[in-house]
Image (cartoon, rainbow, N blue to C red):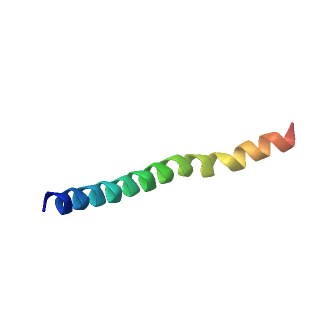
Amino acid sequence: MPQQNAWKQSERWEESRMKNMLCFIVFFLLPVAKLRPAVVGSTFSS
């Protein structure tokens, strides 16, 4: 019985880790996506 409970807990942890990864990716990529046009423009202009 404890084995199954531990498995459920690890499954929930995996799920929360996926959510954390998604949040991290979104918060990391949003500024990058906004900055990229400026970065590309400055790279080509110089």
- In this rendering, is residue 4 above or below 23? below
Q: Which residue is rendered at x = 86% and y = 41% of the image?
A: 45
| Residue 11 in the figure: left or right of residue 35 | left
Out of 27 and 38, give the one closest to the viewer: 27
- Identify the residue at the far top of this view: 46
Quadrant containing the N terminus in the rendered view = bottom left
Residue 3 percent across, percent down from the top left: 19, 59
- In this rendering, is residue 11 above or below 35? below
Q: Which residue is rendered at x = 81% and y = 40% of the image?
A: 43
Q: Which residue is rendered at x = 37% and y = 52% of the image?
A: 17
Q: Which residue is rendered at x = 78% and y = 46% of the image?
A: 41
Location of residue 14 (image quadrant): bottom left
Residue 11 percent across, percent down from the top left: 30, 60
Residue 24 percent across, percent down from the top left: 45, 48
Quadrant containing the C terminus in the rendered view = top right
| Residue 30 in the figure: left or right of residue 35 | left
| Residue 17 in the figure: left or right of residue 29 | left
- Identify the residue at the far left of this view: 1
Out of 13 and 35, give the one closest to the viewer: 13
| Residue 35 in the figure: left or right of residue 31 | right
